[in-house]
Amino acid sequence: MLSCMTLDKYVFRLWVAPFLGGLVLVMSVLLLGRLLKLLKMATSSGQAFSLIVDLLQMTMPYFLLLTVPMAFFLAMQSAITSLQQNSEMDALRASGISYKRMFRSFFAVAILLWLGLTYTSMVLLPQGQLGFNNLLAKIYAMKGVITFSPQRFTRGFDGITIYVDGEDEQGIYRGVILEDHRGGISVIYTAESARFDMTGSQLQLSLDKGVRLEGQEDDQRMLAFDKYMVSIPTSDGNWKQRHSSDHVTMMTPEELWQAVKKNSPGAVAEWNRRLLLPTTVLVLFFFALPFSLTQKRSGKAGSMIAGIALLVLIYNLQLMLHRQVSLGALPGWTMWAEQGTLLLLGIFLWKRAEADRLPKVFSQAGEWVYLLHQFVMHKLGHRLGKS
């Protein structure tokens, strides 16, 4: 019989290598993608290397908030499926050791990661956003170019915030949200697509099929349009120092809380996002066991694919609700309701797994993936044999 400490150490060793490997791999992919974008902006500067290093360092808090929960969850799945495939889990269960006792070390790790990510989200993230925008504004001023990163808020202009979902091969941006608060009154534009053209010292935004919202509550006015033009003055070579109070994503916790008390939708969404993102690691802890118990012959593939699908679902739900709350379409508590519902569902499924009453769809998912894999490999082998 394994001692308590020996079991904890053994299970932890099964987890730590996949966690570190997955974290390094995903972080490398994200940083490489960001590096390629930053190279286009900074290569004409004599300080290109130092600028890029600084910019990448400032994005680290945001990337950690995304990748650490993912790496924790997938590494926990890897450890559980390894124990199952080697029949070690069956032996432990036959000895009277529950899943709760078996994986208590993972829960301790989840608590530590949650605390660390909360500090990252509340303190390091806004500091990184402020430094990133200051350095980016300086690069814009030096180069005189404008660029927008998909699925990130760009604040390279005074009083203007722009968000785009993505860009196609023709240079057309899709899913555009623009907030213009230069006149002291917030005007929000949403458009299906937009083209950005430089004309002298002006950036011309040609918006297609969207809505213009001006004012708040009872004074709000809405205008639907097929085409709309917005002009933004660009930098003249000088750059203005950004301050944390300029935008909710750069605010300190104290500044953000004051904005929340004024019922600013953007501040409410940002405050809840900073608190909720770290809790994702706790939610994923409870989902790891039920999403890892598959038929032995299906191996790790089935559980891993199901786990990745769960990650995509959770992060897309968080992103969707954050957008709606920031636009004032939904109250802030809906973000907590979504995360709380997922947490309760995860706890419910864990308890069902403890009682060996997990819905069959979880155990059969891996079998379906296994059979699909065998079918594809058979077809490929048959075609290669013919050729």
Image: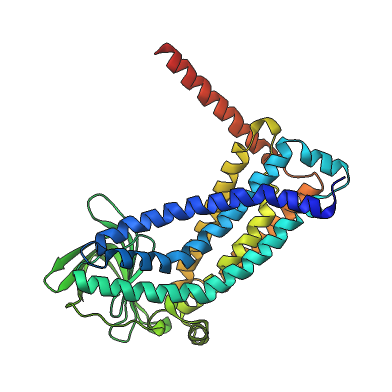
Q: Can residue 271 be seen in this view?
A: no
Residue at the left extreme of this rendering? 200
Quadrant location of residue 36? bottom left
20 left or right, relative to 53: right
221 left or right, relative to 14: left
Residue at the top extreme of this rendering? 386
Q: Nearer the viewer, residue 231 or 94?
A: 94
Q: Which residue is drawn at 45% across and 76% down?
A: 127
Q: Where is residue 387 in the image (x, y as percent from the top left)?
A: 39, 13
Q: Residue at x 52, y 77 (%)?
A: 123
The image shows residue 166, relative to residue 237, as above or below, that is: above
Q: Residue at x 83, y 43 (%)?
A: 92
324 left or right, relative to 37: right
Q: Is residue 83 visible?
A: yes
Q: Which of 142 and 381 is in front in this view?
A: 142
Q: Where is residue 341 in the image (x, y as percent from the top left)?
A: 65, 62
Q: Position of residue 382 (x, y in %)?
A: 48, 16
- Quarter of the rendering occupied by the N terminus: top right
